[in-house]
Image (tube, grey):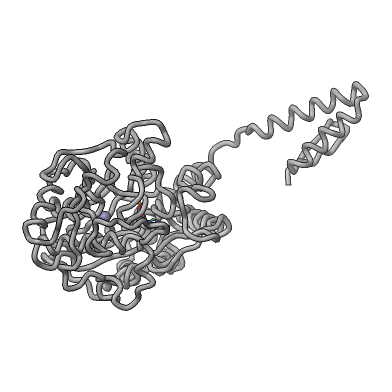
């Protein structure tokens, strides 16, 4: 399998540390608000990577943290803690906010068929591990105390900018505007491992530590949590591209300084989902969530299909027009599958299975080319073979794609077979027609016309016949 590695900036043949086993870590959500569909793009693509590894026979262990403390408004350790901000906004405690939005996140994941990682660990569960790691870094001379906080000393490293050797512009993605200067820092890139004094009054959650009562920095969370559950060597670390700097850069700095050896071999970064006006945001413009898409009548799996149609290393532009295109294609695909008629006694066509499975696997082996994997689904439908074989292959591919191909098609045909009930709209039209008849009887023609115009504005045409008023909808 070939996987693009942000560390080497090229596609590499994937090779795991321990034969047959893959250790995988994912930066989890900061649970101060709902996840937007951009966040969820990252989790969908990481889900496909994990499932493809399993499909290929690897024994995968995947860990995800939940950031419920320490992530400040700017990734560069300044501004207000996002969790505190969320709690203030809703007049609740930080822990209430964390619980509510963690649950909401996993509900969204469920709707999008994103598997829950094997281990999900909230940062607030691991304070002892953070303190152990920070103490170790101080002992080894990689960290210092200043102004009451503990900082990582980046000048002690041979190399700090691990992801931007060739392109410093891209590295700036994670640096937000309006970053204030922290005068305690010895070097521009030094970052906080443990906060005590600064921002302290605002902090709702705080713990005792050898350096005073305080709370952990955001970056140390992921290093310590992955170390706790995956040990000293990691195969793949995932996240959205904005996490590459400074978050992942700092994770590498502190983990390798602490361990004294290389830590993670492959870095998998998902490019952003943007809107026509730029970066997706929880504070600007329409806050795009899975629930909002559902309210607008979209099946969340149409959004998953939309994401799979493009490569994870390309930016993706979200617009309702683009989503409509994907939703229509997804619906058509399910209809085609619903039309299959497998015969139990038919034999599986093994030649077709081998050929089509090979092209599906080749697509994903080529740096998770999901659009080609979706093409392989259409190839199954086009193949000259029996429907039992087709259903077998669709179920097999869906172990990775998770588009509910066969199940969704079944539900669709059940829905189409269900007796048509008089819906609310039809009832409403009938009532309006009855009122119009009354109005005409009372010679109130203005009212009768008003009712006709009102219905016309809703696409309803009335036809007055001898048997009464008939109606049709465009
Ligand atoms: P956060 O909840 O802010 O910690 O982000 C959760 C995940 O979503 C991280 O992996 C981010 O890198 C990723 N992410 C943030 N914005 C986007 C976006 N617009 N498109 C794709 N991924 C994103
Ligand atoms: Zn992280």
At horizontal 60% and vertical 33% (from top left) the residue drawn is: 421
Quadrant containing ligand 1 reads bottom left
Q: Position of residue 204 (x, y in %)?
A: 28, 36
Camera-nearest residue between 75 and 431: 75
Q: Position of residue 202 (x, y in %)?
A: 31, 39
Task: Count the labels in the image.
Answer: 0
Q: Quadrant of the N terminus?
A: bottom left
Quadrant in which residue 431 is drawn: top right
Quadrant in which residue 33 is drawn: top left
At horizontal 9% and vertical 52% (from top left) the residue drawn is: 135
Furthest residue to the right? 443
At horizontal 7% and vertical 60% (from top left) the residue drawn is: 140
| Residue 365 in view here | yes
Q: Position of residue 385 (x, y in %)?
A: 40, 66
Camera-nearest residue between 320 and 302: 320
At horizontal 90% and vertical 30% (from top left) the residue drawn is: 446
- Answer above or below: position of 36 versus 456: below
Camera-nearest residue between 312 and 336: 312
- Using residue 275 as the reference point, say whether residue 248 is left or right of it: left
Quadrant in which residue 249 is drawn: bottom left
Q: Position of residue 63 (x, y in %)?
A: 21, 52
| Residue 332 in view here | no
Furthest residue to the left? 139
- Using residue 218 as the reference point, say whether residue 21 is left or right of it: left
- Using residue 92 as the reference point, say whether residue 446 is left or right of it: right
């Amino acid at each position: 399998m070939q996987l693009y590695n942000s560390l080497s900036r090229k596609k590499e043949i994937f090779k795991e540390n321990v034969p047959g086993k893959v250790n995988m870590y994912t930066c989890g959500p900061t649970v101060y608000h709902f996840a937007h569909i951009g966040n969820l793009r990252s989790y969908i693509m990481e889900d496909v990577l994990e499932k493809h590894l399993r499909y290929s026979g690897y024994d995968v262990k995947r860990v995800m943290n939940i950031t419920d403390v320490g992530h400040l408004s700017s990734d560069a350790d300044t501004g207000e803690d996002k969790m505190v901000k969320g709690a203030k906004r809703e007049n609740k405690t930080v822990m209430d906010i964390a619980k509510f939005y963690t649950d909401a996140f996993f509900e969204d994941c469920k709707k999008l068929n994103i598997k829950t990682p094997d281990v999900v660990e909230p940062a607030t569960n691991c304070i002892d591990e953070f303190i152990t790691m920070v103490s170790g870094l101080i002992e080894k001379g990689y960290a210092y105390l200043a102004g009451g906080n503990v900082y990582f000393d980046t000048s002690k490293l041979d190399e700090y900018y691990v992801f931007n050797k060739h392109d410093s512009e891209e590295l700036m993605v994670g640096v937000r505007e309006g970053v204030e200067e922290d005068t305690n820092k010895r070097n521009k890139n030094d970052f906080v491992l443990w906060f005590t004094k600064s921002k302290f009054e605002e902090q709702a959650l705080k713990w005792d530590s050898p350096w005073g009562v305080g709370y952990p920095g955001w970056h140390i969370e992921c290093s310590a949590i992955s170390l706790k559950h995956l040990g000293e060597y990691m195969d793949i670390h995932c996240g959205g591209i904005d996490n590459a700097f400074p978050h992942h850069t700092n994770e590498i700095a502190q983990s390798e300084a602490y361990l004294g050896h290389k830590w993670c071999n492959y870095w998998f970064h998902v490019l952003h989902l943007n809107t026509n006006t730029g970066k997706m945001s929880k504070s600007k413009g329409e806050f795009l969530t899975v629930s909002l898409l559902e309210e607008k009548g979209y099946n969340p799996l149409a959004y998953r299909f939309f994401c799979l149609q493009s490569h994870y290393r390309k930016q993706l532009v979200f617009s309702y027009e683009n989503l409509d295109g994907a939703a229509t294609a997804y619906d058509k695909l399910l209809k085609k599958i619903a039309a299959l008629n497998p015969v139990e006694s038919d034999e599986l066509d093994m030649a077709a299975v081998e050929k089509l499975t090979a092209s599906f696997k080749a697509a994903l082996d080529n740096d998770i080319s999901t659009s080609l994997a979706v093409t392989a689904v259409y190839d199954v439908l086009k193949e000259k073979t029996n429907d039992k074989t087709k259903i077998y292959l669709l179920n097999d591919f869906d172990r990775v794609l998770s588009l509910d191909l066969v199940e969704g098609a079944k539900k669709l045909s059940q829905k189409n077979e269900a007796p048509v009930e008089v819906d609310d709209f039809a009832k409403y039209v009938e009532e309006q027609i009855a009122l119009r008849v009354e109005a005409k009887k009372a010679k109130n023609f203005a009212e009768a016309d008003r009712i006709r115009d009102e219905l016309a504005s809703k696409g309803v045409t009335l036809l007055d016949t001898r048997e009464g008023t008939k109606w049709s909808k465009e």
